[in-house]
Amino acid sequence: MIVIRIKRKIVLVTAILCLLPNVLIKAQDTLTVSLSKALEIAMSESPTIKVANKEIQRVDYSNKEKMAALFPTISASGSYQRALKKQRMFFSIPGMPSDPNGFEVGQDNTINAGLSASMPLISPTLWASLEMTETDAKLALETARSSKLSLVNQVTKAYYTILLTQDQYSVFKRSYENTAENARIIENKYKQGTVSEFEWIRADVQVKNAGSNVVSAESAVNMSKLQLKMLMGVDMFIGLKIEGSLADFEKNMYGDVLSIDTTSLKTNTDLNQFDIKSMQLNQAFKVQKAAWWPTLAASFNYQYMSMTNDGAALNFFPMSTAAVQLSIPIFQGGARTYKERQLKIQQGQLKDQRDNLRRSLEMQAITYLDNIKKAMEKIESNKEGLRQAEKAVSISKKLYEVGSSTYLDLSNSELAYIQAGLMYNQSIFDYLSAKADLEKLLGKDTK
């Protein structure tokens, strides 16, 4: 009876936890996803990808902005000036008396309207800076690719985490069912007087502990699903059903490992970004060198002007100019020379940083490969251990029923089964996690 009551309580608690989101909002449809489907949704719905794509668009517009400097700059202007107090002029002619009051000059109103244009004819600095636009676009694309690889890694590991928590939940649930069944048998024996009250109480406590493990495991499943939904960029309150189990990936693990090319880091996104930044520094050095060369610019100005007194008709007359300006840099206190030296130092720093990064990545690749190999060995060992643990639980249960073993033997076999199941699932997860990290490090793109 106690076992039945405990089962009812666990079912009630589980139902409350499952129905709690529906109390807050209206229930929504359940989304069933595989790993490939989860990645597909994340690539289209995740804010991380959207931000990366917008950054590419921003860089494209920035490059077009720089290209606009090659075209003429045209502007229109207009002005109106009212003379509040006109200027006075005085003349002094020898032999003639001068007017002490002088006379006013100028008009009451001055109206000016014009059009001006200018464009560079020879500008080495501008030409050199325009070469950087393509490099900026490459860096934006590589940064977006880096964001995609990071998201793929996070979604993949979150998916594996759900499979791990689900498999752990299955282990705890099966253990709870076995423990509850054992407690039922012990309760019957206690009523018949064949076992002590202490043994029945111990079985009752073990059932409660097993039930608590089931609730904790289910909570872990729910939390891992929330993490995946956040990474996918979907509604947090939508139902999520995950296809498959960790064991499904075990049969393909040898082929998956052999398909990974670990001989080169040429597609590693961090190294590629360092290479692009090195190109940017080289182009910045060219821009600085170009500052030593003369520049030539052309300009044109066309204006209409009218100067008239109040009451008089407006008479506009045109005025236009065309000019060519040559600018030759001669001396700026050595600023350009010091700037070039700074860029050379930055180039050296970037090279040293890249070498250090490469060694670090090589170390990580070796570590991931070692983790993969060890995880594969653990999988084989833990798989056999789980098989033996399941067999031991079955045997110990039958022996206890016929009185050939103690409850401690039965309890120990159940504990060994839980440990074996958890270790088996954890070893598969460790293999998949290390494989996902290695693929990210090598810059493997998803198809």
Image (cartoon, rainbow, N blue to C red):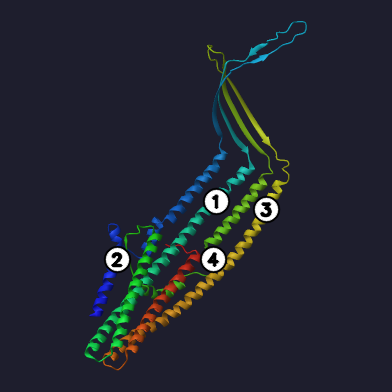
CA gap, disc 4 to disc 3?
Answer: 30 Å
The spot of residue 278 in percent (x, y) is: 60, 56
Seen in the picture, residue 93 relative to 333 is either above or below; the reply is: above
CA gap, disc 3 to disc 1?
Answer: 21 Å
Looking at the picture, tell me which residue is in the foreground, 279 or 335: 335
Counting other residues with Cα less than 10 Å from the Cα at mark 4, is it few (<14), some (14-19), or many (20 or more)? some
Which residue is tagged 4? 265
Which amino acid does the dot numbered 3 rest on? Gln
Reading the chain from its start, which is encountered first: label 4 or label 2? Answer: 2
Which amino acid does the dot numbered 4 rest on? Leu
Residue 136: numbered disc: 1
Reading the chain from its start, which is encountered first: label 1 or label 2? Answer: 2
User: SS for tag 2?
Assistant: helix
Which amino acid does the dot numbered 1 rest on? Asp
Counting other residues with Cα less than 10 Å from the Cα at mark 2, is it few (<14), some (14-19), or many (20 or more)? some
Which residue is tagged 3? 342
Task: Determine which quarter of the picture holds residue 433.
Answer: bottom left
Which amino acid does the dot numbered 2 rest on? Cys
User: Which residue is located at x 29 percent, y 66 percent?
Assistant: 18
Which residue is tagged 2? 18
CA gap, disc 4 to disc 1?
Answer: 22 Å
